[in-house]
């Protein structure tokens, strides 16, 4: 007969295990509503409790949104040399200020002879052009109007193919202008707006730094980057630029490949030609820089990495603080509800049922914090977009909510375990 | 292998027959109060058969509450043996005890012990939640139990919206919902006026008539007189065990 009762006990235990899933679901659902109810009932307390998690989530998502927005911004506005185009310059860009100074001391500038040499020797490019900029920019005047500083650039005619500045009306600088060192200029929209507000600028005499140029063309609007207009330029033929401003030209040479596949080959070809020309020993670094959009993007990604490292640090601190506050509140809640735990235990709740209830309550609470944080971040991103750039990535939302519920789960374990370990009779005795 | 057979045969000899629902053997409970150890129970031995209606009576401090906690598997004895439904429960683990409380015992407390935030229906559903009854079946069983205590029309009321007698009836419905082997009531009328108390006791009478085993802990004579047998406890020992009906 004992065998019989043992068998019965075994089968009933098997049954209790078989239906455990349903119990877990019911307990979770109950804990979910209890958590929401508790948040609703104590609004101020909940706000203070969840502040850490909210700030952490908001910080994380705002940073992710701005970086995400900047990625596009940088790619289109800053690191955009034109498709399949790279630039030979005295130094490699975006390597930091010290590196730049070192390169300026060590490397010789790119000269007109270098440009001509590449133009002759390089094979397979679609276009090659050279530009040179006067630093600092001179003043520009037309009749009563003036601009204190314009970007004055000498260009070869071939830059029309490569540069972002396309003629809106009039014409670009031609080979002939260049050969004759003609005093003509091709101007940006800002110059038109400020110096020729009421008149057609074509054919007018523009004074730049004491020399006059005949306006032959106006460029379409390029736009601005980081709030700095890129339309405040005067392009003049390279020959005139050399004669009037910079007898010993220092150049940037733009090379456009027919497609992305040939760009790497061309870069290598330029490197080999220039190293040979400068007699660089085998193991020395390049005494010049070959810059592509990718160079700038890499520098940006490098910066992004640092931003994220700092952000992760800050978010981790907030999350831990937020988690500890939640743990504290959960401990208080366990004490407040000791009698309830006793009732539940008297009705057959096992340790894991009580554990689950409090862990879920903690996780739900933290998730609510996460969701509030996400909402706040979306709002902030929306405000930021009004004057800058931000775009909330879905991954950020998922990470934000996921991370906060994980924090809730983790910091709920200790209080939940404390609740689960209560002896039923002692818990029941605790009246409240 | 041989020793295993031997152990189980020892258990066989000790295990009570089928008709005995509760058997205690030399139950001791000692509370360690710092310097002094308090003997709450000093070797209590009795049997309760299936279908019995027993009152455990004694003055306060007699150890009757301690006994009830042990019988209800809310606490474990310091020494001694306790069989419930032919299972030796004095040696079970926490989770196994929880399972016994869930399936074998229905509690009715003096202070009702309902969850204040939950509706009557949800309170009655709780024991079913902890044994994993699917939600539809759970609701059916819980409303059936509430109908049995004539609270079918108060299912969605919270305890604060119910009278004392109604609250105790919700608690009784909750005790019954898992169809336990034993209903264990601790001063069930202690917080009720006489008329309401009578109603509740009539309900216990009806439950007994329909075959439930009831153990009632009380210090009131007229409440104890409703039972068929009274076990008097004094100073942690059985003083008198009398059959009155």
Image (tube, rainbow, N blue to C red):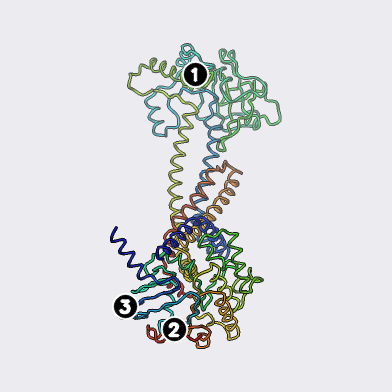
In the rendered image, which residue does mark 3 sit on? B34
Q: Counting residues from the N terminus, which is met first, the one under dot 2 or under dot 3? A: 3
Instruction: Tell me whether the residue at label 1 lies in contact with that at label 2, contact meaning CB atoms closer than 8 angstroms.
Output: no
Secondary structure of the residue carrying tag 1 is helix
What is the distance, in whole Å, between disc 2 and disc 3 at their CAs?
Answer: 31 Å
Q: Residue at x 58, y 81 (%)?
A: B202
Secondary structure of the residue carrying tag 3 is loop
Mark 2 crowd level (few <14, some 14–19, many ≥20, 10 Å Cα): many
On the question of residue B53 being in view, the answer is yes
Compared with residue A102, is residue A389 higher up or lower down, i.e. above or below?
Answer: below
Q: Which mark is residue B231?
A: 2
Q: Nearer the viewer, mark 2 or mark 3?
A: 2
The residue lying furthest to the front in this view is A1
The residue lying furthest to the left in this view is B3
Mark 1 crowd level (few <14, some 14–19, many ≥20, 10 Å Cα): some
The number of numbered discs placed on residues in the rendered structure image is: 3
Q: Residue at x 36, y 76 (%)?
A: B25
Depth check, front residue: A367 or B77: B77
* Image location (x, y in percent) of residue A156: 55, 18
What is the distance, in whole Å, between disc 1 and disc 2 at their CAs?
Answer: 101 Å
Q: In this image, B106 relative to B44: left or right?
A: right
Using the rendered view, name the quadrant where residue A198 is placed: top right
In the rendered image, which residue does mark 1 sit on? A262
Depth check, front residue: A337 or A365: A337
The residue lying furthest to the bottom in this view is B221
Secondary structure of the residue carrying tag 2 is strand
Depth check, front residue: B38 or A430: B38
Subunit of mark 2?
B
Q: Nearer the viewer, mark 1 or mark 3?
A: 3
């Amino acid at each position: 007969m004992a065998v019989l009762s043992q068998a019965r006990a075994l089968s009933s235990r098997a049954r209790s295990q078989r239906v455990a899933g349903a119990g877990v679901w019911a307990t979770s659902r109950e804990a979910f509503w209890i958590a929401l109810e508790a948040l609703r009932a104590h609004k101020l307390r909940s706000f203070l409790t969840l502040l850490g998690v909210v700030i952490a989530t908001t910080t994380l998502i705002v940073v992710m949104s701005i970086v995400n927005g900047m990625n596009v911004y940088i790619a289109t506005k800053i690191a955009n040399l034109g498709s399949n185009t790279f630039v030979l310059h005295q130094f490699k860009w975006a390597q930091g200020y010290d590196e730049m100074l070192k390169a300026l001391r060590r490397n010789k500038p790119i000269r007109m002879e270098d440009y001509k040499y590449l133009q002759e020797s390089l094979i397979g490019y679609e276009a090659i052009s050279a530009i040179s900029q006067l630093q600092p920019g001179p003043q520009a005047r037309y009749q009563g109007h003036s601009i204190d500083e314009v970007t004055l650039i000498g260009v070869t005619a071939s830059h029309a193919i490569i540069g972002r500045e396309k003629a809106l009306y009039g014409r670009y600088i031609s080979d002939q202008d260049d050969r004759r060192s003609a005093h003509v200029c091709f101007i940006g929209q800002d110059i038109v707006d400020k110096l020729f507000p009421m008149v057609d600028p074509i054919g007018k005499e523009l004074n730049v730094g004491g020399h006059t140029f005949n306006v032959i063309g106006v460029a379409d609007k390029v736009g601005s980057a980081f709030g700095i207009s890129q339309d405040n330029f005067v392009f003049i033929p390279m020959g005139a630029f050399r004669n009037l401003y910079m007898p010993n030209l220092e150049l940037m040479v733009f090379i456009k490949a027919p497609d992305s596949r040939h760009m790497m080959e061309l870069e290598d070809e330029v490197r080999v030609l220039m190293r040979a020309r400068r007699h660089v020993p085998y193991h020395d670094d390049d005494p010049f820089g070959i810059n592509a959009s990718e160079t700038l993007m890499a520098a940006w990604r490098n910066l992004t990495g640092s931003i994220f490292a700092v952000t992760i640090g800050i978010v981790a601190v907030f999350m831990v603080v937020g988690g500890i506050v939640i743990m504290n509140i959960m401990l208080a809640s366990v004490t407040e509800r000791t009698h309830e735990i006793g009732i539940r235990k008297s009705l057959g709740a096992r340790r894991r049922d009580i554990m689950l209830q409090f862990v879920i309550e903690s996780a739900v609470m933290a998730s609510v914090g996460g969701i509030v944080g996400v909402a706040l971040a979306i709002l902030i991103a929306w405000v930021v977009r009004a004057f800058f750039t931000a775009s909330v990535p879905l991954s950020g939302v998922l990470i934000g909510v996921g991370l906060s519920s994980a924090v809730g789960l983790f910091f709920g374990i200790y209080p939940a375990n404390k609740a689960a370990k209560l002896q039923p009779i002692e818990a029941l005795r605790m009246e409240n | 292998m041989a020793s295993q057979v031997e152990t189980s045969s020892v258990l066989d000899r000790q295990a009570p027959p089928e008709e005995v629902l509760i058997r205690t053997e030399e139950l001791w409970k000692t509370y360690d109060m710092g310097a002094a150890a308090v003997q709450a129970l000093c070797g209590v031995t009795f049997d309760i058969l299936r279908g019995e209606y027993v009152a455990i009576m004694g003055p306060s401090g007699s150890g009757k509450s301690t006994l009830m906690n042990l019988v209800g598997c809310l606490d474990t004895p310091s020494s001694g043996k306790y069989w419930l439904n032919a299972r030796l429960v004095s040696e079970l683990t926490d989770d196994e005890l929880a399972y016994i409380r869930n399936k074998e015992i229905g509690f009715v407390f003096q202070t009702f012990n309902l969850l204040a935030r939950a509706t009557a229906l949800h309170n009655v559903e709780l024991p079913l939640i902890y044994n994993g009854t699917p939600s539809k079946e759970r609701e059916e069983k819980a409303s059936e139990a509430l109908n049995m205590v004539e609270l079918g029309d108060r299912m969605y009321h919270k305890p604060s919206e119910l009278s004392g007698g109604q609250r105790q009836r919700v608690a009784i419905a909750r005790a019954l919902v898992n169809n336990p082997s034993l209903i264990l009531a601790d001063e069930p009328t202690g917080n009720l006026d006489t008329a309401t108390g009578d109603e509740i006791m009539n309900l216990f009478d009806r439950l007994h008539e329909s075959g439930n085993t009831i153990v009632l802990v009380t210090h009131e004579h007229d409440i104890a007189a409703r039972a068929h047998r009274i076990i008097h406890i004094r100073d942690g020992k059985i003083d008198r065990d009398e059959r009155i009906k």
